[in-house]
Image: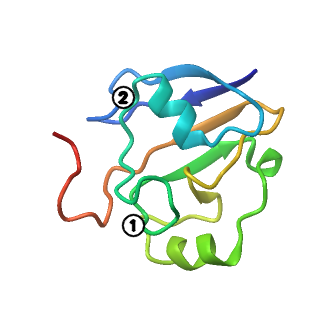
Amino acid sequence: MTEIVVLPHHEICPEGAVVKAEVGESICEALLRHDIDIEHACEMSCACTTCHVIVREGFDSLNEADELEEDYLDKAWGLEPESRLSCQANVGVSCLVVEIPRYTINHASERH
């Protein structure tokens, strides 16, 4: 199991969190499994940017982003060199520190 440290986010995870993920599991899947309700409007099909995260530590341990993910990342709010779509970033063996950006480009939240 790999540890993911989630930095505090004002709505989604105000206190921050530390969760465990299986190697090969996406960051998004791991967060959702631990009740961290990160947006994922396209149901993790790499068709939006709502699950955008910034990987503050452990970026090099993730699988490489493919061209489709790179194209969507170009549309993400607050894009940084260590940005990934959490639905496409598969956890490796190194611990991660991730930040969920304050905003997404999603105009209608999927939360009910």
Which of the 4 image quarters holds residue 67?
A: bottom right
Q: Quick check: 8 above or below 17? A: below
Q: Secondary structure at mark 1?
A: loop
Three-letter code, disc 2: Cys
Which of 25 and 104 lies nearest the eye of the viewer? Answer: 25
Q: Secondary structure at mark 2?
A: loop
Q: Left or right: 86 with respect to 20?
A: left
Where residue 82 appears, as percent x and y from the top left, is 65, 58
- First in sequence: mark 1 or mark 2? 2
Where residue 48 appears, as percent x and y from the top left, is 42, 67
Quadrant containing the N terminus is top right
Label number found at residue 98: none
Which of 78 and 21 lies nearest the eye of the viewer? Answer: 21
Give the Cα separation between the discs numbered 1 and 2: 19 Å
For the point 70% across and 46% down, which residue is it?
Answer: 90
Residue 7 visible within the image: no
Where residue 41 appears, as percent x and y from the top left, is 34, 56
Three-letter code, disc 1: Trp
Which of the 4 image quarters holds residue 50?
A: bottom left
For the point 78% across and 61% down, which residue is it?
Answer: 64
Badge 2: few (under 14), some or many (20 or more) residues near its Cα, within 10 Å?
Answer: some
Residue holding disc 2: 13
Where residue 15 appears, as percent x and y from the top left, is 37, 20
The colour scheme of the drawn protein is: rainbow
Residue holding disc 1: 77
Q: Quick check: 24 above or below 108? A: above
